[in-house]
Image: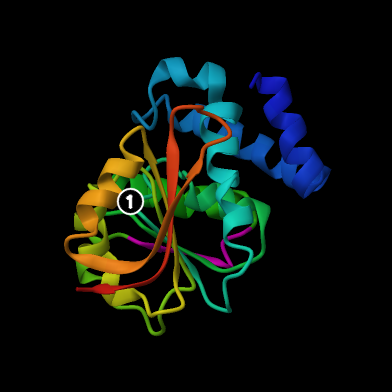
Amino acid sequence: MTEQEARQWIVDRFGVSRETLLDRFDAILRDEATRQNLISSGSFDQLWARHFVDSAQLIDAAAGAGEGVWLDVGTGAGMPGLVVAALIDRPVVLVEPRAKRADFLYRAAALLGIGDRVEVQPRRIESYRPAKPAAIVSARAVAELSQLIASTHHCTDSSTIWLLPKGRAAKSEVEAAAAKWQGSFHVEPSITQADSGIVIAQGVRPR
């Protein structure tokens, strides 16, 4: 997927106004990159395909989620959580333990005009206690699947949809997690990386 194809993919699904919002986020990311290392310098050449569309593709899989927040764990530079917040109106909670990155996320949400529905939690997910279970949990390159579920399970209930990009290891991580966790697990192929998978799970509970 080229950068132009990625932009068109966003426009076709979310409209020009949302693409414009991501264009502003593009500029914010590039400006912040002069102060801290958010993503690898080489990946800016593929920012829309490798990061924006890669994040946005999770939204379709969340279509059946109930009311409640989208909880993104280890948001880092804003993927997928801040991209999701720019594209849909569901409230989003970004959990990011690194203070400098959490501060960036807070400022970026304000600059994008979506700070009223984006909450930044500058802490580890283990110490976050939500008022209500999350409708959706996402995390990108944070931890091995079983460990990730263990650290976030207290933020969920049986209706929570988990959307977890896991790369080439998706299927093997699901098989390993089955020893400790049960529920509905399946792996969807990523549209941005042919050999990568997204773990989609619901009804997750300990064995």
Q: In the figure, 104 relative to 68: above or below?
A: above
Query: Is 68 left or right of 173, judged from the image as shown?
Result: right
- The N terminus appears in which quarter of the rendering? top right
Q: In the figure, 204 relative to 147: above or below?
A: below
Q: Position of residue 140 (x, y in %)?
A: 38, 45
Q: Nearer the viewer, residue 180 or 4?
A: 180
Number of residues whose C-alpha sits closer than 10 Å to that of mark 1, classed few (under 14), some (14–19) or many (20 or more): many
Q: Which residue is mark 1?
A: 74
Q: Position of residue 96 (x, y in %)?
A: 32, 54
Question: What SS does tag 1 mark?
Answer: loop
Image mark count = 1
Query: Is 172 left or right of 83, judged from the image as shown?
Result: left
Q: Nearer the viewer, residue 71 or 105?
A: 71
**Residue that extends furthest to the bottom in the rendered view of this protein:** 131
- Residue in view at x 77 percent, y 31 percent: 8
Span of residues in magenta: 114-121
- Residue in view at x 22 percent, y 47 percent: 144
Task: Mark yes or no: residue 147 visible.
Answer: yes
Amino acid type, callout 1: Gly
Q: Nearer the viewer, residue 204 or 179?
A: 179
Quadrant position of residue 67: bottom right
Quadrant position of residue 88: bottom right
Q: Is residue 170 magenta?
A: no
- The C terminus appears in which quarter of the rendering? bottom left
- Residue in view at x 55 percent, y 21 percent: 46
- Residue in view at x 30 percent, y 37 percent: 169
Q: Is residue 116 magenta?
A: yes
Task: Mark yes or no: residue 98 visible.
Answer: no
What kind of colouring is applied to the model shown? rainbow
Q: Position of residue 42 (x, y in %)?
A: 44, 15
Q: In the figure, 49 relative to 177: above or below?
A: above
Q: Position of residue 33 (x, y in %)?
A: 43, 27
